Amino acid sequence: MTTDIASKPTLDVSAGYILAYRLFDVAYAIDLGKAEDTWARTVRTGSSRGRLTNTPPKAIAFGVPPVSLGLGTIALPMPDSPLQVTVTARLYDFGVISIALRLPVADLSWAAFSQRLNAVDRAVGLAPATALWTELLDRVRQGIGDALVRPIPSTLEEDYLVGVANAFSEPVTAETLIGQLDLIPLLSGEQRPLSEGARRDLLRHRYSYYTDDMVVLTWDRAFIYEPRGDTDVIDVLEVANAQLLEMRYYDELLDAELPRMYDLVEATRRRWMLPGARRFADLARRLYTMVAEVTELTEKVDNALQVTEDVYLARIYAAALELFRVPTVSAAVDRKLSIIRDTYTALYDEAHSSRSEWLEIVILVLIFVEIVLAIVR
């Protein structure tokens, strides 16, 4: 039975904000210490190391705390008129830069809050905002100088949208919010009524710790009610998106590498002369180096957030990873790495076998020469 939300009294959002962020894969790694120094020297604004504000470090913490940078205030192009947003950037040591646009809101009806969030979502995907994202990314790149280790073109991106309410026009609980607010337009971006099954799916990942807070997650959006101003959930969602982006990069990298590897193996096998053993060994070393590099970076990504004791944030983090399909992409990367490892082992064995065959031939030739010399004498 569908809840008749329209017949119930509505709530206004007294204070909150809309957060739109986009993540870019820009390098093999980022030297965070050098990035901080270069940023302070060239841009001359502050930077800080990220930490979860209201969670003890022993409960959940960043593996390597990212560096947060302030980029000031800019005008976000909108169809009606530009909106002033605060811009921050965050650098992750495994080569990801996240740029966030924060738009404060106050004294909006719930319907107006949903409409504002949907308008921001549409605006950040239009051409003017796309150019804006590129400009902001270039500013960060220039500000951190050569802190990027083996930079790459930022062809892969992830984006996410969060609506945060810090206060309503009257005291509310999580159950009150579900009963009085229609979250579906905000979570889906749809204006037409959704089926009951679709509504249930959108509200399936709903979490509360206290009676007066709530988090609802979807694939590309989230709604958070947090009266204490805690930002830990937002940080956790950003890390999960960064992990997805990096795993996608390695998945595509290995997708491109596997056909190339098969061609190299076939070309090497067609060469039966003595240097073939050396070519097998060289190719095996190249594949081993790739496996080692990808394994090292994927372990960094996997350990980006270390969860030990905070059960609530751990549940949200696990749900976000599952929603974003991070385990699925990670499993695909592991399978492709396994194929390359098996190929490396086969090449190494083949190189060893080839050397042994040539050694046997040399020994036989020497024995033959000894026999001929003995007969001659």
Image: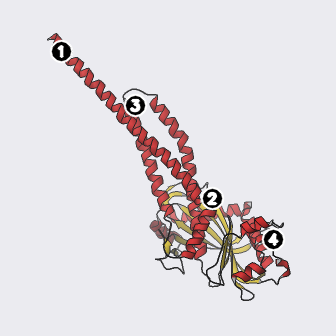
Q: CA distance from mark 2 to mark 3?
A: 42 Å
For the residues labelled 1 and 4, say whether their Cβ atoms are less than 8 Å apart: no
Say which of 339 and 36 sits in front: 339
Q: CA distance from mark 2 to mark 4?
A: 27 Å
Of pointers 3 and 1, the one earlier in the residue sequence: 3
- Find the residue positioned furthest to the top: 376
Residue 374 visible in this rendered orientation of the protein: yes
Q: As displayed, is residue 325 above or below residue 180?
A: above
- Model colouring: secondary structure
- Coordinates of residue 93 in the picture (x, y in percent): 49, 64
- Identify which amino acid the numbered label 4 is placed on: Asp
- Identify which amino acid the numbered label 2 is placed on: Glu
- Find the residue positioned furthest to the bottom: 170
- Identify which amino acid the numbered label 1 is placed on: Leu
Can you say which quadrant of the picture contains the C terminus? top left
Residue position for label 4: 80
- Identify which amino acid the numbered label 3 is placed on: Gly
- Coordinates of residue 317 in the picture (x, y in percent): 58, 69
Q: CA distance from mark 3 to mark 1?
A: 32 Å
Give neighbour class at mark 4: few <14, some 14-19, many 20+ (Cα, 10 Å). Answer: few
Q: Judge from the rendering whether residue 353 lies leftward or rightward of residue 237; answer left or right.
A: left
Give neighbour class at mark 2: few <14, some 14-19, many 20+ (Cα, 10 Å). Answer: many
Numbered label attached to residue 373? 1
Element assignment for label 2 = strand
Q: CA distance from mark 1 to mark 4?
A: 99 Å
Residue position for label 2: 157
Please give the name of the residue rendered at 22% of the width and 18% of the height, measured from the top-left corner.
369
Residue position for label 3: 276
Q: Disc 2 or disc 1, which is closer to the eye?
A: 1
Residue 250 visible in this rendered orientation of the protein: no
Q: As displayed, is residue 150 above or below residue 10?
A: above
Please give the name of the residue rendered at 48% of the width and 53% of the height, measured from the top-left corner.
294
